[in-house]
Image (cartoon, rainbow, N blue to C red):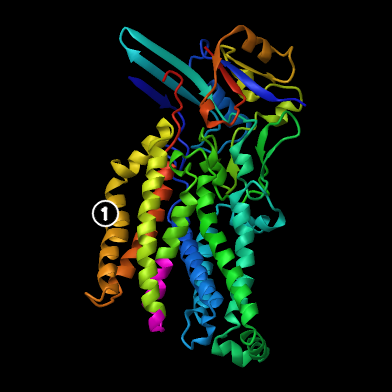
Amino acid sequence: MNEITTTRHNHMIDPSLSVWGWEIPVYLFLGGMVAGMMLISGYFLFKGRQTEENCSCYYLPFMSSILLTIGMVALFLDLEHKLFVWRLYTTFQITSAMSWGSWILVLVYPILAVNMILRPPKFQMNKFSILGEWKKYLINKPVLLKYLGVITMFFGAGIGLYTGVLLSSLGARPLWSSAILWLLFLISGLSGAAAFVHVIAKDVYERELLAKADNAFLIIELFVIALFIIGLKTATEVQAQAADLLLTGQFAPSFWVFVIGIGIIIPLIIQLLAVNHKISHTALAPLMVIIGGLILRFIIVAAGQYSHWFNSNFQ
Amino acid sequence: MARYGMVIDTKKCVGCQDCVIACQAENNVPQGFCRDWITTESNGKFPTIQLEIRTERCNHCTDAPCVSCCPTGASHYHDIGGVVLVNHNECIGCKACIASCPYDARYVHPDGYIDKCTFCIHRVEKGQDPACVSVCPTHCMYFGDFDDPNSKVNQLLQSRKYHLLIPEAGTKPNIFYLI
């Protein structure tokens, strides 16, 4: 038997780490969604679909900026020293994933703003007439729009993978010590965004395309989760035990039921039937995908904080 | 360049917590928190039981993940001895450093910034030992410079067996435990 006792009793540190509550998972989820939406919107621009009246590239950038702002508010609420938040932007720390992220987020807003010029909201058009001129200039430059699409996709992917790197760069938590956590968050963000856009898309072609794409993303996500687990199980003892938290431990019921079952398998079956015209498209499956993506972030953040190295000399 | 660290003799430590109280008094540590603490580890089955009592704190790692993950540079290596410190006026309280520390040596100060052991740098700069070292009734703790081959801490490491805490985390901790 090996027993370790400690006199330490610091708030949020003991008995297990719990410094990050709901704010970080919500931010990671919204960041992932925005990443996915930027990839989708950028892809449609790249393919020249701005010629379609109802192309989602006209409204996704505005929605992305709203969701990203909500996510950043959640991030701000998590800070313990809120008045010092401006310190993020007085320096660039090359080894800090959070520093990279804060600067990427600053660059994303102007890119979304340029995207929004393609069809500015009416209240803005009335206020700033110059927007109409910019819109006319941009819309007649298909090559320029292709480049804009590529840049939008690039920064969308940047946000998506950064949310994963943010956690996996914190090597003290064995569950996060995975080189493919970024891929899991990116693909989960893509599947959530595809599900969301599938529901709100006005264009029938885009709706069908995104339903099919979402099925592909969900299948890839299953593979990535399997690889994530295999990677941990075949690594060090602490990482194997961290994987067990999800497979059989205290986070297993919510992981299997909400992430794998409700978040991936069931919506995948529903959407496969829908794209094969066996049943009609409803908002149910996309909603399940989105909820599954949110709960995935909650579980990864909570279980990651719970996982730790063994501070043992004898074993 | 100096590299400050500690050597702690686990054969002498009795877990009296004098070091914990001394730290709290010296550094005005808020009530309910501690920068150092006592860990007791027992292993085996009667009658072959091993017991180790040790005083723990921030390991002031040479390759500190709390420094590399800090987005503002608030967590930094001090010019003197490579001691890991937090600049309160630059800390935004994002808690990434807390999550990155394999020793869970940091905590959120009620004033919002992240707090931890400083090796009592204000005392060290005056040529004094950290408070915890100076009050230890069994003299189980030694503070010194590992870059000085003649220092007491280096002599102890040459003459005794020792272990580190969680060396597999790869952070190059600077507190050594004599066994």
Badge 1: chain ID: A
Q: Nearer the viewer, residue B47 or A134?
A: A134
Q: How many marks?
A: 1
Name above or below for residue A30 compared with residue B22: below
| In the image: residue A134, left or right of residue A306 | right
| In the image: residue A216, left or right of residue B117 | left
Q: Is residue A15 visible?
A: no
The stretch in magenta equals: A192-205
| In the image: residue B3, left or right of residue A83 | right
Report the amino acid beneath label 1.
Val
Query: Dot 1 lies on which element?
Result: helix
Name above or below for residue B105 compared with residue A113: above
Q: Quadrant of the C terminus of chain A?
A: top left
Name above or below for residue A5 compared with residue A192: above
Query: Which residue is drawn at the image coordinates 22% and 74% (left, top)?
Result: A278
Name above or below for residue A114 compared with residue A305: below
Q: Position of residue B125 (x, y in %)?
A: 76, 28
For label 1, the residue is A257
Magenta segment main secondary structure = helix
Q: Position of residue B100 (x, y in %)?
A: 54, 40
Q: How many residues crowd around disc 1 within 10 Å: few (fewer than 14), some, or many (20 or more)?
A: some
Task: Tell me the quarter of the picture where residue A190 sits.
Answer: bottom left
Q: Is residue A1 visible?
A: yes
Q: Position of residue A12 (x, y in %)?
A: 46, 43
Decide whether residue A50 is among the magenta residues.
no
Q: Nearer the viewer, residue B87 or A255?
A: A255
Query: Which residue is drawn at the image coordinates 76% and 34% (left, top)?
Result: B79
Q: Nearer the viewer, residue B147 or A186?
A: A186
Q: Position of residue A295 (x, y in %)?
A: 36, 57
Furthest toward the left, the residue is A278
Decide whether residue A193 is among the magenta residues.
yes
